[in-house]
């Protein structure tokens, strides 16, 4: 019977299932974490423990699988848990291609953890089909991760086209469809293998549930590996949250359709506004991916849009501070309309322009939202847009070099996003014949593990590059260094490490050296305690061991709780 019903009806009636014991139309909540065993040890229900099975989230999973057109669904404790489960089900050494514009939390997780664990992560513009095709390494690329529309620039990727490219060389395609929802786009119909949602957003829609979901087109071994990861890692949703999620999905179509209509009205009203340099919304004909969106999205273009405010960050922050109806908060997809300055939220690794405001349109009267923005924009004059991070200019000796331009383009596109997120940066300083020299700065732990990846990437994508050298701002020590191990360590830190970390107002201080173990302290600005291990183990320790084979290890003696300028405060976020 359900196969003959529309998705809208299936959502409204939560599949139309009725509790067999009571006849209740509202699904039952099963808070129990355990299930009774028979005298012979078997489970009469087939359920053993809620970390693996619970009928409450089984119901929500069946509903979302039906809405997406998949064969199965798994709920997770959050959108991040759902997304990272896909990556964690890959194997060390696997090459993955990821949308360059995507939810910042996943980009940061990839840079901070996935790379450290051995995934070869490369960021690409997935709206550029030629770039996607060129970036795939047959036999090594295992996953293409696409976010569309991509938060917060709302680029739209042609799913059918990238799926065809990927599947031709046996690459799995996963699509983060949080902004589109199954109301507007069903990625599986365009060839996606997996669909991922931050269910906290539109699926729940009331800003009161933290949840994530993955839907699969087929029940294959990779799907079972994701299931095993969820069970083993305990990344499951609670029964009450699962029940709230299925309740939220009952009104999904009404909410998404209304917010999409309002977003389109707002985008049209402000398109060309004198205080704005751009309105980013796939529903506008001026959007670079509008034709793809019109073909791929049915019934609307989502309730998400972004405004680029003339005059840069200061004016953008002023507009966000002046609204009265919009609420200043993170997240999206709820019944209330939200406004947020994304660059200040995402931090220095963000590729997002600093003049951008992200809007999540809720269920208020669109005329009230338009009036609120009109009033906030009234005092902003059109003084020109400010962009995101400004690339450093080429050295004078390389100006006009096509080879240099090609190298910089690859670095900016595929290297910089992950390097910056890990607390470092690289820039081109010289090309001599076919040898490229890059200068690193910031955390050694950000650059050293990526050196071989950078060289392989430039070899593959820039004809004429035979060798890549990564150097540090200070001079490399030469033979004839002091015999005393402590002094040799100190000189390496001062000549090679500290000139690099000084770029982030930091310093590595030598405490002592005893029995081959180097004790150091991190001082000044830093990337936060979560990256200290990366800085030391994959950066400082690796560099010292390469220079001084007698080094047995590096020990961090820093009092991190006393840090005065961390990127993320200890104990928070």
Image (cartoon, rainbow, N blue to C red):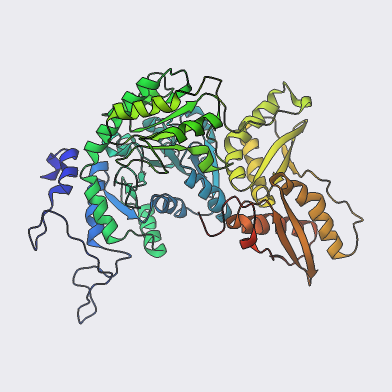
Reply above or below: 328 against 44. above
Q: Residue at left 67%, top 46%? A: 451
Q: Residue at left 24%, top 72%? A: 35
Residue 29's x, y, as percent? Answer: 21, 61
Q: Nearer the viewer, residue 351 or 192?
A: 351
Q: Residue furthest toward the bottom?
A: 39
Q: Nearer the viewer, residue 462 or 401?
A: 401
Q: Nearer the viewer, residue 319 or 426?
A: 319
Q: Nearer the viewer, residue 190 or 448?
A: 448
Residue 362's x, y, as percent? Answer: 31, 36
Give the image quarter of residue 70: top left
Reply above or below: 353 against 285. below
Residue 281 appearing in the image: no
Asked whether, in this view, residue 309 is left or right of residue 38, the answer is: right
Asked whether, in this view, residue 56 is left or right of residue 549, the answer is: left
Residue 380 appearing in the image: yes
Residue 157's x, y, as percent? Answer: 41, 31
């Amino acid at each position: 019977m359900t196969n003959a019903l529309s998705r809208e009806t299936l959502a409204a009636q939560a599949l139309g299932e009725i509790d067999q014991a009571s006849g209740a139309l509202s699904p039952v909540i099963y808070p129990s974490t355990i299930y009774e065993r028979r005298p012979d040890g078997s489970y009469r229900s087939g359920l053993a423990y809620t970390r693996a099975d619970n009928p409450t989230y089984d119901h929500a999973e069946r509903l979302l699988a039906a809405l997406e057109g998949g064969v199965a669904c798994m709920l997770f404790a959050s959108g991040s848990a759902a997304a990272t489960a896909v990556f964690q089900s890959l194997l060390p050494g696997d090459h993955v291609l990821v949308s360059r514009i995507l939810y910042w939390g996943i980009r940061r997780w990839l840079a901070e953890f996935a790379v450290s664990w051995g995934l070869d992560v490369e960021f690409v513009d997935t709206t550029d089909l030629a770039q996607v095709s060129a970036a795939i390494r047959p036999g090594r690329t295992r996953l293409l991760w696409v976010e569309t529309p991509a938060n917060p620039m709302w680029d739209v990727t042609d799913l059918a086209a990238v799926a065809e490219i990927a599947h031709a060389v046996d690459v799995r395609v996963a699509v983060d469809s949080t902004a589109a929802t199954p109301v507007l786009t069903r990625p599986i119909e365009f060839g996606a293998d997996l669909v991922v949602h931050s269910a906290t957003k539109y699926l729940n829609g009331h800003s009161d549930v933290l949840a994530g979901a993955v839907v699969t087109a087929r029940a294959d071994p990779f799907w079972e590996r994701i299931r095993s990861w969820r069970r083993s890692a305990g990344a499951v949703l609670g029964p009450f949250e699962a029940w709230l999620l299925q309740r939220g999905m009952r009104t999904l179509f009404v909410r998404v359709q209304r917010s999409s209509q309002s977003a389109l009205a707002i985008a049209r009203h402000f398109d060309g506004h004198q205080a704005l340099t751009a309105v980013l919304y796939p529903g506008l004909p001026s959007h670079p991916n509008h034709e793809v969106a019109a073909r791929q999205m049915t019934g609307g273009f989502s309730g998400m849009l972004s405004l680029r405010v003339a005059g840069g960050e200061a004016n953008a922050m002023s507009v966000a501070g002046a609204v009265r109806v919009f609420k200043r908060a993170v997240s999206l997809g709820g019944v209330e309309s939200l406004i947020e300055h994304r660059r200040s939220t995402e931090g220095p690794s963000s590729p997002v322009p600093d003049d951008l405001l992200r809007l999540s349109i809720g269920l208020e009267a669109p005329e009230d939202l338009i009036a609120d923005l009109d009033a906030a924009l009234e005092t902003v004059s059109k003084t020109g847009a400010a962009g995101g991070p400004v690339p450093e200019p080429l050295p004078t000796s390389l100006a006009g070099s096509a080879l240099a331009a090609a190298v910089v383009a690859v670095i900016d596109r595929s290297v910089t996003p992950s390097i910056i997120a890990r607390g470092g940066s690289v820039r081109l300083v010289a090309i001599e014949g076919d040898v490229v020299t890059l200068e690193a700065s910031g955390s050694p732990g950000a650059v050293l593990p990526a050196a071989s990846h950078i060289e392989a990437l430039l070899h593959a994508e820039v004809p004429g590059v035979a060798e890549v050298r990564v150097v540090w701002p200070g001079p490399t020590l030469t033979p004839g260094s002091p015999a005393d191990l402590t002094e040799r360590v100190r000189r390496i830190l001062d000549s090679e490490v500290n000139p690099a970390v000084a770029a982030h107002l930091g310093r590595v201080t030598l405490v002592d050296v005893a029995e081959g173990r180097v004790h150091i302290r991190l001082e000044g600005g830093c990337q936060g305690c979560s990256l200290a291990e990366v800085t030391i183990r994959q950066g400082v320790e690796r560099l010292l061991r390469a220079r001084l084979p007698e080094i047995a290890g590096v020990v961090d003696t820093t009092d991190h709780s006393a840090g005065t300028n961390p990127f993320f405060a200890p104990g928070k976020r």
